[in-house]
Image (tube, coloured by chain):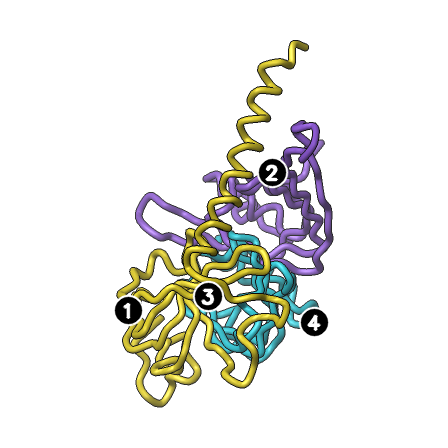
Amino acid sequence: MSWASPDDVFLSTSLATYLDKKILVLLRDGRKLLGLLRSFDQFANVVLEGACERIIVGDLYCDIPLGLYVIRGENVVLIGELDLEKDELPPHMTRVSTAEIKRAQKAERDATVLKGSMRKRMEFLDFD
Amino acid sequence: MATEEESAVKEPLDLIRLSLDERIYVKLRSDRELRGKLHWVTVWLLQAYDQHLNMILGDVEEVVTTVEIDDETYEEIVRTTRRTVPFLFVRGDGVILVSPPLRTA
Amino acid sequence: MLFFSYFKDLVGREVTVELKNDLAIRGTLHSVDQYLNIKLENTRVVDQDKYPHMLSVRNCFIRGSVVRYVQLPPDGVDVDLLHDATRREARGG
């Protein structure tokens, strides 16, 4: 991403075209942040105003408010400009409270851990 | 025809360039393998010691190997999925090894 | 040939960018830079059901370091030109 002059900013990979727009930032750890893009630099470091984290577990989701966020570019996977005319999520998804989404998240994590530990036990019993 | 000078292999990467327009094998991170015709390879120098082999392959077959744990028996299931892609740019930082076609001459 | 100058010729064409986190996005190539950062327009995610949060994303910036593959349009690949470029680089040209 270069510091393009105003003339070619629309032809470059500059994030200037997303300034003051609602964006989705996908992070390397899988987290999804939403907010208004207020600033950026050539490393894709970005400043998000009114940021929130969107947690999705199956058909449930919740937006957790975070405030003003500075995100380091090396953690960024993708920055998407949201089309405000379109629904942000499919109609079958349900918004739930923070407590509920955290519960769902924990249940999902526990299931994965259980699967892993059961597998280890199976390996232990596997004599051949 | 390549001249003698052009076809001389002086460093490892020359061997890959010699495979231009031939089918090569590429092993990538996250258990992926590619077989395809090498159309383009470029050395991308990130730092003095860090080189990436960016490539464009044609008629590519990709094989991905995944291991899943069965929900009921908790047994490991090894799956391989295959697909073909007409032209693929491969970013060099995922490349583990490149093998040119076997030559008998 | 700088490695990204080839991509510049593909601006305006449909490509599929596959990321290291397995997300695959199809869209019109808007721009690319020397780090292989990519901007796509009119994007759609290949496996939309798996990525509901991407539903309303129409334009996006992809950080070059997370790209695994780019699927190129078959008629946008000039094989002879690519071969020449590879040979030129081998001679240090």
Mark 3, secondary structure of its residue: strand
- Mark 3 or mark 4: which is in front? 3
Q: Which amino acid does label 3 sit on?
A: Ile
- Mark 1 or mark 4: which is in front? 1
Q: Mark 3 points at which residue?
A: C62
The chain identifier of the residue carrying mark 4 reads C
Camera sees residue A106: yes
Say which quadrant the C terminus of chain C sits in: bottom left
Q: What residue type is labelled 1?
A: Gly
Q: Chain A is drawn in which colour?
A: yellow
Q: Do the numbered discs 3 and 1 sit on residues whose CB atoms are within 8 Å?
A: no
- How far separated are the C-alphas under marks 1 and 4? 47 Å
Q: How crowded is mark 1: few (under 14 residues within 10 Å), some or many (20 or more)?
A: few
Q: What residue type is labelled 2?
A: Ser
Camera sees residue B105: no
- How far separated are the C-alphas under marks 4 and 2? 27 Å
Looking at the picture, does residue B75 appear above or below residue C75? Answer: above
- Mark 3 or mark 1: which is in front? 1
Q: Mark 2 points at which residue?
A: B99
The chain identifier of the residue carrying mark 1 reads A
Q: Colour of chain B?
A: purple
Looking at the image, which residue is at 38% across and 60% down?
Answer: A76
- How far separated are the C-alphas under marks 3 and 1? 24 Å
Mark 2, secondary structure of its residue: strand
- Mark 2 or mark 3: which is in front? 3
Q: Mark 4 points at which residue?
A: C75
Q: What residue type is labelled 4?
A: Asp
- Classify residue B28 as left or right of residue C93: right
